[in-house]
Amino acid sequence: VTATTLRIGGAMSLSGDLSMGTVEFFGDSTVQDDFTYLNTTVTGKATLAGTTTVNGNLTVNGSAGELVLNGQTMTVSGNLTTNGKIQMTNAADSLTVAGNALFRAVNCSGSSHGTFSAGTLRVRGNFTQTRYEPKYNYDWCDNATFSASGTHKTILDGTSQQTITFDSGGSASNYSHF
């Protein structure tokens, strides 16, 4: 398959080479393994079916954007940007980001931030968590957009100095912490 952008909104069954600029998962989709994806955007629910490689950037976007690792391994050679949800609830979940990781809120709802209760997130670049940016000044909230809990581990193991930034880290065990 050769295309500039491939949009997948359901079941995926491809064979051969996958060559394109961007893949977008916009529906309730299963991410087929055995492919190396280039830049990838998740705007619906995308569940990994096996080991997945993204040679480029991964974006999980919007209130409907949800990436479920499903006990699988995902490696991203570029940056991770999310204002959607990432679900890491299985001890076997593994997400490695060679570049920077940016966690932004879609709204003030804690349910828009994903679940990091198991598995391992490795970030080799900078780690940034930002709070919700409201449309109106009275909408400010201070919800943590990265809330690790349970047995989840976040490992910062870059080969050079890394910067960690939290706009609203929280101090309890159910908020952002390292």
Image (cartoon, rainbow, N blue to C red):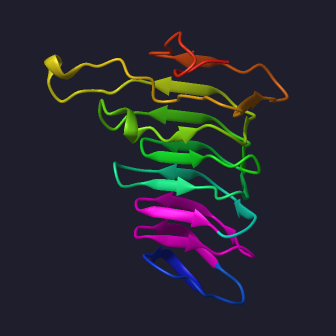
- The reply to whether the magenta stretch includes residue 38 is yes
Is the residue 119 above or below the residue 29 in the image? above
Extreme residue in the front direction: 150
Residue located at (33% from left, 38% from top): 106
Residue located at (71% from left, 33% from top): 151
> Does residue 18 appear left or right of residue 155 in this picture?
left
Q: Quadrant of residue 140?
A: top left
Residue located at (73% from left, 68% from top): 50
- The reply to whether the magenta stretch includes residue 64 is no
Residue located at (55% from left, 26% from top): 128
Residue 64 drawn at (x, y percent):
36, 55
Which corner quadrant holds the N terminus? Answer: bottom right
Residue 5 drawn at (x, y percent):
48, 73
Extreme residue in the top direction: 171
Is the residue 162 above or below the residue 91 in the image? above
Which corner quadrant holds the C terminus? Answer: top right
Is the residue 46 above or below the residue 102 in the image? below
Q: Quadrant of residue 54?
A: bottom right
> Does residue 159 appear left or right of residue 37 in this picture?
right
Q: Which residues are magenta?
A: 19-48
Is the residue 41 above or below the residue 92 in the image? below
Residue 32 drawn at (x, y percent):
65, 75
Helix, strand or loop: magenta stretch: strand
